[in-house]
Amino acid sequence: MKAQDVTQWSWLPLAMALIAVAVLTRPAMPIDETRYLSVAWEMWQSGDYLVPHTNGLPYSHKPPLLFWLINFGWWLWDVQEWSARLTAPFCGLVALFLSRNLAGSLFPQFREVQKVTPFILLGMLCWAILASLTMFDTLMSCMALLGYLIAYRGATGTLKRWWLFMGLAIGGGVLAKGPIILVYVMPALLLAPWWTKTLAVSWKRWYGELLLAFVIGSIVALSWALPAAWAGGEEYGHTLLFGQTAGRMVKAFDHQRPMYYYPLILPLVFFPWSCWMPMWRGFWRADKKNEGTRFLVSILLPAFIILSLVSAKQVHYLLPLLPAAAILIALGAVQQVEGNRFDRIFFFSICGLITAAITVLPFLPIHGSSARFISQLPFWLGLCPLIAGLAFIKPGQKQFAVSTTRMTIAMALFFLMVHIGLSGPIHANYSFSGVSKAVADLDQQNQRVAVYPGKLDDQFHFAARLTKPVIPLYGQAISTIATTAPDAALLFNFKPAKLPELPEGVMAEPYKGGWLLLFQPGVTTENAVFLADLLKRKEDK
């Protein structure tokens, strides 16, 4: 690959365009984005920046750094949805810069690796989709990348007092998403004598300084965790300090999946690079004993094994590892050989299969919560993979196009078309803007709102800008609901095959393959038979 094929910063406007289109074309997605925005809103509304809350109760599932950053944006621009939803994607932009910096440090002899790494990461399916969401993993990716940079420069002697900066990175990672930061950065630190040819200090001193970095990181994390545990109460403190990490490592509260889950989805995570044969040939030709290559392997392989052994598994847990994988892919890209006819046929066969799958999907006899969403997909959505794939062919040549920029631009076009194509179905099924406005009006009138089932109690606080908690209801009979909140409005989540005729005073809005029914105050008790029938259908289902 020629250096002039890749401009220095042309990936930046492309990344900004992808983020802008993603945020503009879809609402905050339930259940995660809406939950995290609600927690941030309760922090802002209550003024309690020590203990995050959800529906008035301490929220122990996640640490506060992302919520602090969202609140900082609101302090600058007042409470705006756009600033909150751009916070995590902005961390993704920072991660692209850090990835480029890390690639330059690892492979100074291959300047092209540094230049193409942001393109590789930006064009990766998993990163392009997940980095635009309000989640903790892009923030964790920044902390992990800082850890990688500090580890490499500390081991090679280009960064003095690396242990201090590493401690701050570890502490920041704990505040970003918890002790899982150790899974991402600790293996490379422990394996430093293996991947570096000349460790800057003796191995005894290295491990002593590593212990010091761990102590500093623990002090940074505990400087928040201990006061928060004391302020949040005994149950919150125990869950915060012991329950979450142990529970997810041994037996997940949710998201429990088999060990082969991550290996099974890897081709999709790395698409389209997983189907780019010239890159694979170039990578296998690369020097496997190179210090930078070994460093990346010491990051990826141990962390991947540990994450596969952990009970809870989600695809976004892999996000902090993708920058290291992108650098490896870039290393293969700059040492690749020319493509051939088989490469072109193979890749377009993959694009054709994806096109066929998307095209026939609305015509399949699919039932359940996904059926309505799939039926609303636009007819042209299936053509997106083939349209994007046209950019991979150089006119007048029979060889597979090997330009990384063309591949990334093609994938960016694909992501843009998909976001635009899915905008209508997503808004129709996930926005609940009408119900949110009605709930906001009730809150301004000092009317309480009950939600059934109770797990919805963290979904509407930011969307409706609620000033007081909702009343969560869990599996009670109709008589219990009526006596628990007789004067409250009721927000009821229902997934019927067909929406029944609604009584007066009940509004309905599509929600996740079902419906949100909002009963105005008093309507619940007046229509006890109707509500009992809904509950019976829900229980039968």
Image (cartoon, grey):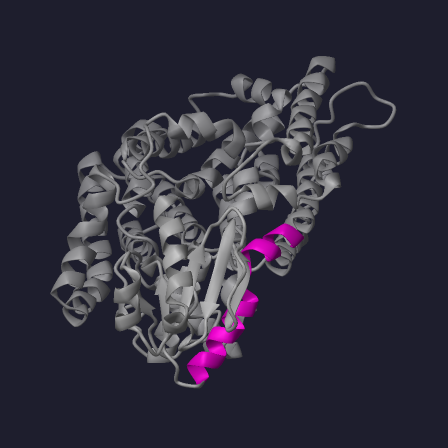
The answer to whether 223 is drawn above or below residue 327 in the figure is below
- Return the residue nearer the eye: 318 or 534: 534
| Left or right relative to 317: residue 513 | right
On the image, which quarter does residue 340 sit in?
top right
Question: Which x, y percent locates residue 353?
Answer: 66, 24
Q: Quadrant of the C terminus?
A: top left
Image position of 270 (left or right of 422): left
Please, which residue is most extreme toward the left here?
A: 234
- Asked which quadrant contains residue 93, the reply is bottom right
Looking at the image, which residue is at 32% across and 57% down? 172
Quarter holding the N terminus is top right
- Residue 337 in picture, x, y percent from top left: 66, 19
Q: Is residue 34 above or below residue 310?
A: below
Which residue occupies the foreground of this view, 26 or 168?
Answer: 26
What residue is rendered at 43% in x and 43% in y? 316
Q: Residue furthest front?
A: 529
Is 442 included in the stretch rendered in magenta? yes
Q: Residue at x 33, y 79 (%)?
A: 46
* Span of residues in magenta: 424-444
Magenta span has 199? no
Q: Is residue 503 visible to the viewer in this orientation of the structure? A: yes
| Front residue of this view, candidates 155 and 62 | 62
SS majority, magenta? helix
Establish if 234 lies above or below 302: below
Give the residue furthest to the bottom. Answer: 445
The image shows residue 321 at horizontal and vertical percentages of 42, 39
Q: Is residue 339 visible?
A: no
Count the marks.
0
